[in-house]
Amino acid sequence: MLTTVAPGLPVSAHSVLDVVPQLPGQSAAAALRETAEVALTADDLGYRRFWLDEQHGVRGVGGAAPAVLAAILAARTDRIRLGAGGLPLTNHQPLVVAEQFAALAAAYPSRIDLGVAEQCAVPSTVLASGARDSFPRRLDELRGFLQGDVRLALAGLAPPVFVLADHPRAAVAAAVRGLPVFVAHHRAAAVTAAAVAAYRENFEPTARPYLAVTVGVVAAESDEAAFTRFAEYVRVSSRLAAAGAEATSAELTALLESPLTDRERALAERLLEDPGYIVGSRTTVAGRLGTLVAETMADEVMLVPLAFDGLIRSTILRTVAAGLTGAVRTAPRHTSPLIATA
C-alpha cells in the first residue's frame, strides 16, 4: 500500500510537459487544437509552465518544433509560461535558438522559457561522444548570445535558460553555471538520485539552486480507472512503436482497432513499478507527488500527462489539481493579444 503524505507543493509550483500527441489519421490541425485546449486548461488551473518536448521521428508525437508551438500557444493563453522542454543544443545552432527565443520573449514578456537538453529522443540513435562534449560549449555560446555577445534581432529581456537533464553529466553542466535544472525523472528514473546529487554538489553559489523533476502521470477518480487509462496509453504507444517503418496511416489505424491484450495489460502492470510514472486516484497521485518532492527536495514538479486524447490530458491535470488543493478553482480567462503591447 502506498503511503499518502502531504502534497508538498501547490498547483502553482507544478508545470506541464506535452509532446503534442497525434494519432494515425488525425490531422496536424486537430492535434494542435487539442494541445491548445490542454494548455488553456493548465493556464486556467494555475499551473506554472507549459513546455513542448522536442522529439523527432517518433510515431504519435508532433512536438518537433517547440519554438513555433510555443508561439502558437502563447497567443492562445495569457498567464502560463510557454517554452521548450529539452530543445537539444547538439541539433541546433545556438545563435538560431537565441534569435528565436529572444523574439518570442519580446512578443510575450515574462512568459517564455528556454529549456535545453543534451540530446532529443530519436529512435535507434546513439549520441556520439563528440556531441556530448559539445553540449557545454554550445550552452555557453547560447547564453553569451542571449546576454549580448551578438546583437539579436527583436531582442528584449532575455528568456531564462533551463537544462533538462536525463544524466548526471547534464545536471553538472547546469550546476557549474548556476542554472536551474529539470531532472527527466519520467525518462530515466534510475539516474534521478545521482543527477539530483550531482546538481546540488556542484552548484556554483552565484544564485540559489533551483531543481525540478518531471514525472509521467495518469490521474482519475479511482486507482482502477487510472490504471485503465494507463493501460490504454501503453496499448497505443507500444503498438505504434512496434509497427514497421513503412506502415501506412491506414495500416496503423487498423493496428490500433483491436482491444487491449493480456500481454499489453501485463506490460502496463510492470510499468507501474517504474518510479518515473505515477498512476492512481487524485489522493494516490497527490501522495506520491509529495513523496517525490520529499525525496528530491524539488522546487517544482513538471507533469507529463500520459494520454493521446487531449480531453483526457486535460482531465488528468484537473484531477491532479483537485488532489493538491481539495478543489479545482479555475481562474478567469482573459483575451490575450497576439503581440504584447509592452
Image: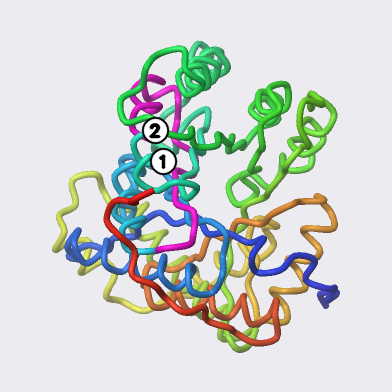
Q: Which residues are magenta?
A: 78-102
Mark 1 vs 2: CB contact within 8 A: yes
| Image quarter in which the N terminus is found | bottom right
The image quadrant of residue 33 is bottom left
Q: Compared with residue 290, is residue 200 higher up or lower down, i.e. above or below?
A: above
Q: Residues within 10 Å of mark 2 (few under 14, many from 20)?
A: many
Q: Amino acid at mark 1?
A: Ala
Return the residue at label 2.
102
58 on left or right of 211: left
Cα separation, mark 1 vs mark 2, equals: 5 Å
Residue at the extreme front: 342
Q: Compared with residue 196, is residue 143 higher up or lower down, i.e. above or below?
A: above
Return the residue at label 1.
105
Q: Compared with residue 156, is residue 305 higher up or lower down, i.e. above or below?
A: below
SS category of the residue bearing label 2: helix
- Residue 159: x and y in percent read 49, 37
Q: Nearer the viewer, residue 3 or 274?
A: 3
Q: Nearer the viewer, residue 161 or 184?
A: 161
Q: Residues within 10 Å of mark 1 (few under 14, many from 20)?
A: many
Q: Amino acid at mark 2?
A: Ala
Q: Residue at (57%, 78%) from the top-left corner?
A: 227
The image quadrant of residue 286 is bottom right
